[in-house]
Image (tube, rainbow, N blue to C red):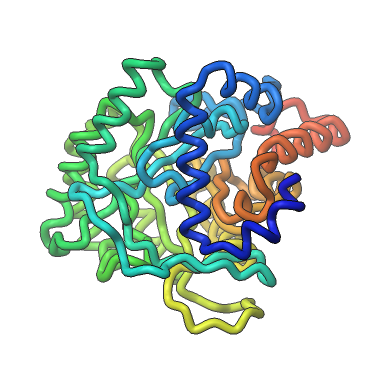
């Protein structure tokens, strides 16, 4: 059905369609019987798919990456669609409209997207109120909920720790884990927070607040040099972060066949090789000491299997969902189970390099 609808959908403005889909999922999340029907049709329940990472249990390794549900409007619906975890945001301390439109572009020939959204969101306090209402009405989210935090655009870099701390403190009761996003290419100067001195100041402030009571992860860019990654890893271990997310979107246009002059972060299949390369480097350097969530160019069960076998504890998808549709997670989970049976694998942890 989705393949029949996709040509029509892809003729519409990408952001307009995205907003309509989010409205539909938000509506679905408020309807228990309809949500249960979706869950039965779209999700795969099997203990063999379960994963434990940074103290949390995930029913399967496939999560929704930050950027899709920026304002946490459809948390319950994502679980019904089969996701093993959901990451909302990026959220900022202050509400902000993001960059001027148009700011989201499909590249179907490459199965890719370019976005320069600019952390458009309703702000930490509004999202905290929404999550509070969801908890009071429906209880805790059915799968682990990650909250991805970014810097408000108007906040100077030297005040970034205070800005992140405000968001973290407001949203603290609602996230199962939190992510420090210093790697989006769409907020001017944000990636400078990956520099050693600025990152150390930021980590010191946030870890001082969390005191390791909940998992705190760092999301990094794919465009870093190995030397920069090594400096980040040293800080991540020094401040005892719970894990890494690799990677965000790229400013590189390597491997892209579609002619484009659009600025912004590139995601989808052109990012696949670099994301996998960064994952393997991180796992080699860390030797399994920290869980890694792998993101970038993941479309199929074979992609997920490769990431897990290369050292990822979990994966996340975004662009793949746009191209593959709402049954993507179901197809991946079934594909993983079939592969596990063929290869005599009892649990996904067996795939990690030894």
State the quadrant of the N terminus: top right
Residue 317 is situated, as x and y percent measured from the top left of the image, at 57, 48
Quadrant of residue 326 in the image? Answer: top right
Residue 127 is situated, as x and y percent measured from the top left of the image, at 28, 37
Q: Is residue 224 visible?
A: no
Left or right of residue 336, residue 219 in this image = left
Left or right of residue 19, residue 191 in this image = left
State the quadrant of the C terminus: top right
Left or right of residue 85, residue 4 in this image = right
The residue closer to the viewer here, 128 or 216, is 128
Task: Give the answer, above or below, for where 180 lies relative to 177.
Answer: below
Q: Is residue 263 visible?
A: yes
Residue under the point 55% across and 65% down: 113
Residue 179 is situated, as x and y percent measured from the top left of the image, at 35, 44
Residue under the point 41% across and 16% down: 138
Left or right of residue 159, residue 74 in this image = right
Quadrant of residue 223 in the image? Answer: bottom left
Residue under the point 65% across and 33% down: 349
Residue under the point 34% across and 20% down: 135
Residue 330 is situated, as x and y percent measured from the top left of the image, at 71, 35
């Amino acid at each position: 059905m989705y393949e029949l609808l996709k040509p029509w959908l892809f003729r519409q403005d990408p952001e307009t369609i995205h907003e309509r889909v989010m409205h539909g999922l938000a509506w679905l999340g408020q309807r228990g019987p309809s949500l249960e029907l979706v869950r039965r049709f779209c999700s795969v329940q099997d203990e063999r798919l379960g994963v434990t990472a940074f103290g949390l249990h995930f029913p399967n390794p496939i999560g929704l990456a930050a950027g899709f549900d920026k304002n946490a409007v459809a948390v319950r619906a994502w679980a019904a669609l089969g996701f093993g975890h959901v990451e909302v945001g990026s959220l900022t301390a202050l509400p902000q409209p993001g960059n001027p439109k148009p700011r989201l572009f499909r590249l179907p020939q490459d199965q890719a997207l370019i976005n320069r959204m600019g952390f458009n969101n309703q702000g930490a306090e509004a999202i905290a109120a929404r999550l509070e209402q969801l908890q009071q009405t429906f209880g805790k989210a059915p799968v682990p909920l990650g909250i991805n935090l970014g810097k408000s655009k108007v906040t100077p870099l030297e005040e970034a720790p205070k800005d992140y701390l405000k968001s973290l403190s407001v949203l603290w009761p609602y996230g199962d884990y939190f992510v420090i996003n210093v790697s989006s290419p769409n907020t001017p100067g944000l990636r400078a927070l990956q520099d050693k001195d600025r990152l150390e100041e930021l980590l010191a402030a946030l870890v001082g607040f969390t005191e390791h009571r909940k998992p705190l992860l760092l999301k990094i860019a794919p465009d870093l040099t190995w030397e920069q990654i090594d400096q980040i890893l040293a800080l991540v271990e020094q401040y005892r972060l719970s894990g890494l997310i690799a990677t965000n979107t790229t400013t590189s246009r390597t491997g892209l066949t579609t002619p484009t002059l659009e600025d912004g972060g590139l995601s989808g299949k052109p990012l696949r090789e670099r994301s996998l390369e960064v994952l393997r480097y991180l796992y080699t350097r860390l030797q399994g000491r920290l869980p890694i969530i792998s993101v970038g160019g993941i479309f199929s069960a074979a992609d997920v299997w490769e990431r897990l076998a290369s050292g990822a504890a979990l994966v996340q998808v975004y662009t793949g969902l746009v191209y593959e549709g709402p049954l993507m997670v179901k197809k991946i989970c079934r594909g993983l189970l079939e592969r596990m049976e063929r290869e005599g694998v009892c649990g996904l942890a067996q795939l990690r390099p030894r």
